[in-house]
Image (tube, rainbow, N blue to C red):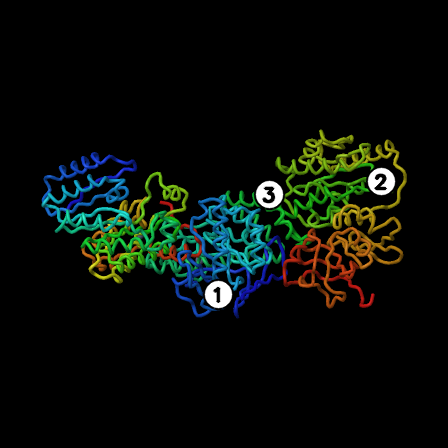
């Protein structure tokens, strides 16, 4: 009997966990290597062909040429089901048969080996849609692990293995086996692999090759060896005098170290919410690596996004095109388009450039824009929908400038935009402006690349656009004066009436819509709500004297009270059904969740319902909705408020 | 010794044409001195009436029996044509000559023969053929195929060793190990061009021969004359050691002494032993670009 448990921690589908087999416990992610790699926690071997070590678990492959008498030496070992090498040549239909063959083999083994000790080999030519049904059935019969093969070319077969990983049940242990280069480690971990085969460390060593983080070095051909401080390489100085055996030994130790370093770097990056950044930076290892990430961002978006947290690290570096469609970025763009609704009283849309400093309001340039608004409009400035153009988020309504990742992203600010960035922002702008009346006026206070964005969207914009100062820097004295003049004129032309301060209400409602769906803001923060506080700190919202939510500047999100949860519950958004009536302690564990909104992402504010559908608690999710249902262990929600017993 | 080659083609060839071809070959060797060994290779079975008409077959056998120089004859056949009748005729016509029927056993595993080689008989049929031939004092030369497609390097190694042991137990007289080479317009070639097949390593062949020689009774000869050895389409290692190992294999075939392998060594042995272990686990064809 073996068991795989996933712990907390998320940055995309990557996770940490523990794999228990018999009495052995292996922390994942883990590396697996050959029998003589005694420093590794997992080793591979072949049934009836190799010796068994005295300790540490072994994954035994079952050759299809051995038809019966399969036994596992110890309860801590696992069995890799039989398949055929090069079988993928025969196409996806044959791949289906290879899978069936394994299922038959699994049934043949009888009671001595349980399905939880078996690892399915997923043919890389398997059809990913058809396989989901197979996976579901196998899950029911107790299978909990699958191995996916990579040939290291990063071609169609490797790509398909990654896609297939995306449709594997969340609670399965997944292995990436084959020729895996060090630079593939972060991306494989990112898409959710738990065990990585480092056989290539030995293959390379046997070919006289030292592997590095992003490339490799042929030791025999190298005139000047690259410096390495690892203990194995310390004895490499007198290289020419080493015997062949010794050299292979040194190189394999070095190569193994490189894998260990990259895995550890990946785990740390995940804990710091920077795994995506690491994955993006590794795309520079080779063009196929770059191409692979781009294709995965397209095809596996749903899988990657589902496990990408909605809150995260303080800084998110977005350096190049590989960031344009990262899940957090694309989700932000899609949510703003789908969920942001401008308040009715916005008559002017002011387009502004972004600033390096976040939130934008804290930057020097935006303070200057704010002064110009105050000077020209005074209390009427809240009729202006401030919209910040930026890459690669597209645009950020002022109300959402403190939300993740708008408040955290960091880009090289050069003012030069490439065609893809311009296109992304232009599309976002067109969608944004469709939400305003045709009679609204668009004031574009932009220049350079930002101006290109507006101009390339112009044809599809129905409102009139006024460019304040297209040929000059936006913060020059003249430009700011031109902005003031334009706004002043607009006040007259649009005949804007006096209005109260609506900044707090607008921000809280927009934030609510972003978190809990369109229309939720008006329900959570009704007309009669009393708002107190500062946006750069905290704003509380009370209805009939009871607090319903609070805006916390640091996160840029709303945290709910039980009353707030009750107001939102009828919307069927961000809900979790809890088994039982009384919640003990400060958390809810996955085992106690009977059903959950599949739209929930790690980091979301969630509403916990009891079996009668009554709000029992509110809190912050630690996993995605589907995980809460699929996983047997792990913390699902950290509670913020819960109902007192008897309430 | 010298061999004649009657090359079979895939289309049915009329009997008189076969006979003509055979006469031709004999004439070409008219200046050779005995003792000679004749191997009749056809694409299928020399003993299959549909392929070689009975008359033609008997005429060829007559021609051989008339030639005093011939001491050894190898005829090829599938096991089902090794019958009481055919063995009786051969015994009668070639009495006194050392006769072997070459049969492509390829593998003693029915699963591998069916899945990887696509041959339509069972190991039992082969065993029966051996018994039948033996009853007529005719030997069987078993052809063993080293590394058909869809096997890992170690699957292939172990299968060949086991096949040789099995064949010896069944009573064959000679075992001929044939490492697969990549021939044009074959499935193997299609796999090979896609990086999904690598011809066996010479190390694997050496291992098969050594292990088998240690297990099998010394009365049974184990021979190997590898085609395209050291070439990328044939059994090969790393290029540097290919020639010396191929030579050792040929020496072994002559003297049956595994000592010829003792001194062999090369850097590439590490890669080969990695391949043995890792291919089983990853089911990924390990081939290096040459
Ligand atoms: Zn080193
Ligand atoms: Zn070599």
- Secondary structure at badge 3 equals helix
Check disc 2 and report the residue beneath it: A345
Residue A36 in percent (x, y) is at 41, 63
- Horizontal side, residue A584 vs residue A112: left or right: right
- Calculate the distance from the C-alpha at mark 1 to the C-alpha at mark 2: 67 Å
- Horizontal side, residue B14 vs residue A345: left or right: left
Task: Compare marks 1 and 2 and give the one earlier in the sequence.
Answer: 1
Density class for disc 1 (Cα within 10 Å; few <14, some 14-19, many ≥20) is: many
Q: Chain of mark 1?
A: A
Task: Classify residue A622 by image quadrant.
Answer: bottom right
Residue A536 in percent (x, y) is at 78, 52
Quadrant in which the N terminus of chain A appears: bottom right
The reply to whether residue B267 is in sight is: no
Quadrant in which the C terminus of chain A appears: bottom right
Task: Compare marks 3 and 1 and give the one earlier in the sequence.
Answer: 1
Task: Give residue A298's mark.
Answer: 3
The reply to whether the residue tagged 3 has its Cβ within 8 angstroms of ligand 1 is no
- Horizontal side, residue A140 vs residue A344: left or right: left
Check disc 1 and report the residue beneath it: A77
- Secondary structure at badge 1 equals loop
The reply to whether residue A588 is in sight is: yes
Residue A341 in percent (x, y) is at 78, 42
Q: Looking at the image, which residue is at 48% across and 65% down? A: A77
């Amino acid at each position: 009997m073996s068991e795989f448990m996933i712990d907390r921690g998320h940055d995309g589908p990557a996770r940490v966990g523990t794999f228990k087999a018999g009495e052995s416990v292996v922390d994942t992610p883990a590396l697996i290597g050959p029998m003589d790699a005694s420093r590794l926690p997992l080793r591979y071997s072949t049934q009836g062909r190799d010796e068994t070590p005295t300790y540490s678990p072994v994954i035994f492959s079952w050759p299809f040429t051995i038809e019966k008498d399969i036994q596992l030496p110890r309860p801590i070992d696992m069995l890799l089901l039989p398949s055929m090498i090069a079988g993928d040549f025969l196409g996806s239909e044959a791949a289906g048969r290879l899978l069936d063959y394994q299922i038959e083999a699994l049934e043949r083994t009888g009671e001595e080996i349980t399905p939880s000790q078996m690892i399915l080999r997923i043919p890389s030519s398997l059809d990913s849609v058809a396989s989901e049904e197979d996976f579901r059935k196998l899950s029911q019969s107790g299978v909990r692990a699958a191995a996916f093969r990579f040939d290291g070319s990063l071609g169609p077969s490797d790509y398909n293995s990654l896609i297939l990983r995306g449709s594997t049940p969340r609670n399965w242990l997944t292995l990436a086996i084959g020729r895996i280069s060090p630079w593939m480690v972060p991306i494989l971990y990112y898409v959710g692999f738990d065990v990585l085969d480092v056989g290539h460390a030995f293959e390379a060593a046997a070919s006289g090759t030292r592997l590095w983080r992003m490339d490799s070095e042929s030791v025999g051909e190298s005139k000047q060896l690259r410096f390495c401080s690892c203990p194995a390489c310390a004895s490499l100085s007198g290289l020419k005098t080493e015997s062949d055996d010794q050299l292979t030994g040194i190189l394999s130790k070095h190569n193994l170290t490189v894998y260990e370093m990259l895995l550890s770097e990946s785990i740390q990056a995940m804990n710091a919410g920077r795994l995506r950044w690491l994955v993006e930076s590794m795309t520079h290892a080779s063009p196929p690596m770059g191409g692979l990430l781009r294709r995965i961002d397209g095809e596996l978006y749903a899988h990657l996004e589902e496990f990408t947290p909605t809150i995260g690290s303080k800084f998110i570096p977005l350096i190049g095109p590989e960031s344009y469609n990262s899940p957090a970025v694309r989700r932000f763009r899609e949510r703003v388009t789908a969920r942001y609704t401008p308040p009715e009283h916005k008559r002017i849309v002011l387009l502004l450039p972004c600033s390096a400093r976040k939130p934008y309001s804290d930057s020097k340039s935006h303070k200057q824009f704010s002064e110009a608004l105050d000077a020209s409009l005074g209390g009427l400035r809240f009729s202006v929908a401030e919209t910040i153009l930026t890459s690669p988020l597209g645009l950020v309504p002022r109300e959402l400038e403190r939300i993740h990742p708008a408040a955290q992203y960091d880009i090289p600010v050069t003012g030069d935009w490439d065609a893809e960035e311009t296109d992304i922002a232009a599309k976002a702008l067109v969608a944004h402006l469709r939400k305003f009346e045709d009679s609204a006026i668009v004031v574009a206070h932009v220049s350079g690349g930002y101006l290109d964005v507006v101009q390339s969207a112009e044809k599809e914009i129905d409102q009139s656009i006024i460019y304040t100062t297209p040929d000059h820097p936006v913060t020059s004295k003249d430009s700011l004066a031109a902005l003031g003049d334009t706004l002043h004129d607009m006040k007259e032309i649009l005949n804007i009436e006096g209005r109260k301060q609506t900044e707090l209400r607008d921000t809280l409602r927009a934030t609510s819509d972003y978190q809990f769906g369109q229309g939720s803001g008006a329900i959570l923060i009704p007309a009669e709500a009393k708002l107190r506080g500062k946006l750069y700190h905290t704003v509380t919202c009370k209805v009939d004297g009871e607090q319903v939510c609070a805006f916390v500047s640091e996160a840029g999100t709303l945290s709910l009270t039980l009353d707030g949860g009750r107001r939102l519950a009828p919307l069927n958004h961000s809900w979790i059904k809890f088994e039982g009536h009384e919640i003990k302690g400060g958390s809810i564990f996955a085992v106690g969740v009977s059903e959950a909104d599949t739209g929930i992402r790690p980091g979301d504010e969630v509403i916990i319902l009891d079996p009668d559908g009554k709000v029992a608690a509110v809190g912050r999710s630690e996993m995605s909705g589907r995980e809460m249902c699929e996983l047997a262990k792990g913390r699902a929600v950290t509670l913020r408020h819960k109902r007192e017993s008897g309430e | 010794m010298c061999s004649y080659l009657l090359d079979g083609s895939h289309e049915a060839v009329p009997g008189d044409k076969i006979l003509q071809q055979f006469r031709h070959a004999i004439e070409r060797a008219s200046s050779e001195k005995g003792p000679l060994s004749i191997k009749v290779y056809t694409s299928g079975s020399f003993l299959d009436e549909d392929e070689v008409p009975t008359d033609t077959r008997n005429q060829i056998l007559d021609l051989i029996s008339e030639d005093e120089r011939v001491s050894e004859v190898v005829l090829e056949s599938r096991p089902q044509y090794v019958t009481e009748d055919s063995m009786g005729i051969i015994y009668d016509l070639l009495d006194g000559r050392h006769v072997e029927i070459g049969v492509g056993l390829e593998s003693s595993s029915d699963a591998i023969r069916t899945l990887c080689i696509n041959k339509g008989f069972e190991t039992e049929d082969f065993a029966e053929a051996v018994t039948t031939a033996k009853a007529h004092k005719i030997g069987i030369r078993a052809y063993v195929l080293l590394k058909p497609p869809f096997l890992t390097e170690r699957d292939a190694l172990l299968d060949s060793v086991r096949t040789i042991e099995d064949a010896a137990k069944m009573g064959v007289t000679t075992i001929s190990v044939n490492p697969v080479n990549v021939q044009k317009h074959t499935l193997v070639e299609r796999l090979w061009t896609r990086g999904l097949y690598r011809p066996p390593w010479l190390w694997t062949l050496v291992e098969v021969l050594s292990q088998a020689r240690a297990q099998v009774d010394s009365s049974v000869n184990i021979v190997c004359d590898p085609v395209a050895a050291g070439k990328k389409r044939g059994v090969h290692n790393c290029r540097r050691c290919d020639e010396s190992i191929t030579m050792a294999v040929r020496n072994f075939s002559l003297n049956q002494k595994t000592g010829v392998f003792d001194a062999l060594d090369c850097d590439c042995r590490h890669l080969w032993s990695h391949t043995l272990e890792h291919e089983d686990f990853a089911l990924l064809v390990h081939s290096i670009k040459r």
